Amino acid sequence: MGEAVSTSCERCTIEIAISAMQCPHCGWPGRYPNVIQASLEAEALNKRYEDALERAHSAGTGSVTQRFEKAIDGSYAVICVKVNEAHRLVFGETELKATYYATSDTRFPRAKPPAGADWDAIRELVDGALFTDPVKRHIRFAALAMTFEGLTSYGPCTLVCDTSMIEHRSSTFETNSCHFFVKRGAIPFKDASVDLPQGFRSTWPDRSKLCTAKLAAKLAPDTTEAEFAAILMERGAATADDEYVEVHICGPISLRTLKGVAIDQNAPTAVGHRGILADLRDRLRRHDLFLKENT
Amino acid sequence: MKAILSGRAAAALIVDGDTWLRIDADRSEDLWASGPHEWSYVFGVCQDLQFLDVQSHEDVRAALTAAVDQEHALSLALICLDSETHDETRELAADDLDQIVTRTPMAIEFLRKVFSSKPLPSIAFIRQARAVSSGAAREFFVRLEHDQPAIARVNDAWNALPREIFSELDADEIFAFAVHSGLCLKFTDAVRQSHPIEIPLDSKIAGYQIAADLRRIVTSWAASIVQDVIPALPHHRQSASRPPSGRDARKPETVLAYSGSLALSEFSDLLVRELPFIERITHVICRRLGMVADEIEEFTAEVRLRLVKNDYAVLRAYQGRTSFSTYMAAIVRRMFIDYRRHSLGKWRDSAEAQRLGPLGIDVERAIVRDGRTPQETLTLLREKHPGITIAEIERIARSLPVKIRHVRVPVEEAESIESTGDADRVVRMDTAARISAVVCAFIDNLPAEEQLIFRLRFDCDMTVAQISRSLHRDQQVLYRLLNKHFDALRAELTKVGVDARAVEDLIGSDSTLLDFGLKDRVARPSDEDESAEAARQEDTSS
């Protein structure tokens, strides 16, 4: 993938694989490969960012670009899910949840496409999307947003992550990473011949640089702050046309990871949603998480 | 056309050639253009993915609706059971649950599978859930409450499985298989209904690479449940109303059902599983038969070895004609006897003990063979011989012939033990003297010619054929004559408390102690000639 494959442990300084989430030599924990990879591309990102700023100044959008960049500093990672999935997350850390949801979740064997000529092509795509890099198993995909509304075509409940719970383990990517790679002919990802450009990802603190590099050209001198959100996240007619900055959160997400949930009230409801939504609201209130009903 | 769907994500991706489409359960009539780039957003970290070959979009919709209803049913059931749920929300959830399970009956089966995995925690509001629900939902909660003891037992049996049995397999995944394949539920139903456990695994696990390991683990689990709970007689042979009793445990069909289908390599697992039980039997039998602790350990090791020998021949030979407990007890008892014979020699009751009858035999076995004290013997035999006293036991013991009792000692202590050779020799001389006396008296009463035959046979070591030629007597007649005298002699020896074993021991090891006076008997004409000739020669020389 054109990525660096090794780095050194910050504690013992011995060379280790970037994908290692713990130093295999000294056991130093808390390594987030996605963040490390992004930090290795900082120089390339800075180059893109400075180029974008220069173009913005030339185009007379330097001021609005600065405001946009500042606004991005306050952006969130949001994940859109179905009602049932949101309820699972907020059901709490009760023994009931631990017992039965965990049992229900565990599958044997882990879900894999079955063998067969037709399935093999799909498997190749799916493996490329999910399994090639072992780190991907630990990555939760989110979108960067300035409001409490995410890509609701994937579900009416927008989970808004508490930044303090994810900033150390999150990185951002230019767009839907799978789409990005597909466009460059990098499916399956293991195709090493595809040379992916550098500077299209950032650490969480540098997300404003990434967004500026990507979106400064879309700003006009009269662009208002109210319009920034729509520039950051464009919802297309089809999900393939959605344009947004992707967030990679390494590690688990629980109720405590969330700042709150926004529910799209225009979304259709199914049998069973009444009870689940009622309980979802009860529990959000009980845990002092915000509940926003988007109309 | 292929489809990947998740009830938890409430969505499906359809792959038809190069075309990818998405169906959301909330708007299942709509088809959305899609692609692999959506995968992470559609399914997230959901693991309940189903991979289907389908004919039409309708097939996908039907499968998706069922999967989503199952997931919703689980969430609603948990809402109903959770103690933190508001009352009005619980009622709403119970109503939704009833609607779902009415629409999708298989959701009830899914719930039963998941809830059979573990007993409800004490915080669960099962009564409240039952109270607010109606219809199929209420039936589910009533049954769930009723099933709790059985679920707990099945779960206990799982938790009791030794960790080694999983080797490097993930126990949680194996357990998940048991839950999702309905195995937990089957076991629970079997326990609740006191039915025998069946393991219809083959079709379900054959496709997995670890099928053999899976079968082994599940078999052990089933056996563990049976051991503790299940009466395993076939249903048609047992009274349905009869509750399981201790005697019902380990019925043959149960073990046979498992062992009969096992590959040879899996008998080792069967043995490992049954070993604690077998060792328990072994210890009981050994203690009952007077074996000391150290020897019990040694014998137990011997039992283990013999169970493994010849490809677990002992286990394979079990045909279920009796309970496994009885079978193993008989096997261990047989092994015990063999072990004793091998280490101490075959025990034979003395003629004196036989003459004294059952009490004499039992006293001799207890005191002489097993080395018990008279007091211990009294305790042991009191039930079998009511009224027996310690004085009587001591009297019988004094009348019994002296026998050498073998005592096992560790080889490292053997050097420090004083030789008992002198004492042994005294005993052996005493026995030899008694034998010699009986034989001499017997021979003395024989006609002269027959005494001659005895002398030729035993003093001159001539064969019957040689005697026949020498005396011009028919060989068969001589055989019959000798056998007749042997029988008579054996009877005489028995009368004075000497058994054939004692004679064999002496002849085989120290025949010099025996003296039948053959040389002292009236000289044969040839002997007389020889002695006269010798005397003559002596006179001449002097």
Image: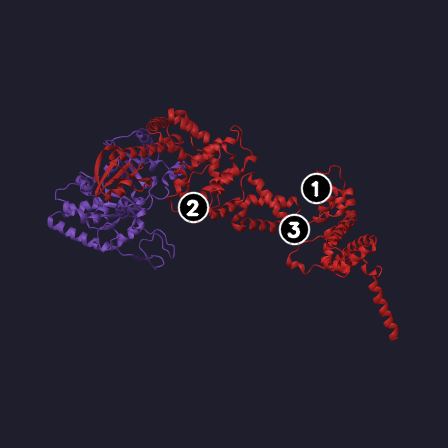
Chain colours: A purple, B red
Whole-Å distance between the Cαs marked 3 and 1?
A: 22 Å
> To which quarter of the image does residue B99 belong?
top left
Which residue corresponds to mark 3?
B341
User: Badge 3: how crowded within 10 Å, few (<14), some, or many (20+)?
Assistant: few
Q: Is residue A269 above or below residue A13?
A: above
Q: Nearer the viewer, mark 3 or mark 2?
A: 3
The residue pinned by badge 2 equals B212
Query: How far from the left and from the top, in percent, is residue B421?
Result: 74, 59
Q: Quadrant of the C terminus of chain B?
A: bottom right
**SS at mark 2?**
helix
Q: Quadrant of residue B130?
A: top left
Amino acid type at circle 1 is Leu
- Whether residue B274 appears in this view of the structure is yes
Residue B380 numbered mark, or none: 1
Residue nearest the viewer, comparing A1 with B158: B158
Upstream in sequence: badge 2 or badge 1: 2
- Which chain is mark 3 on? B
Position of residue A242 measured from the top left corner of the image (x, y, whole percent): 20, 41
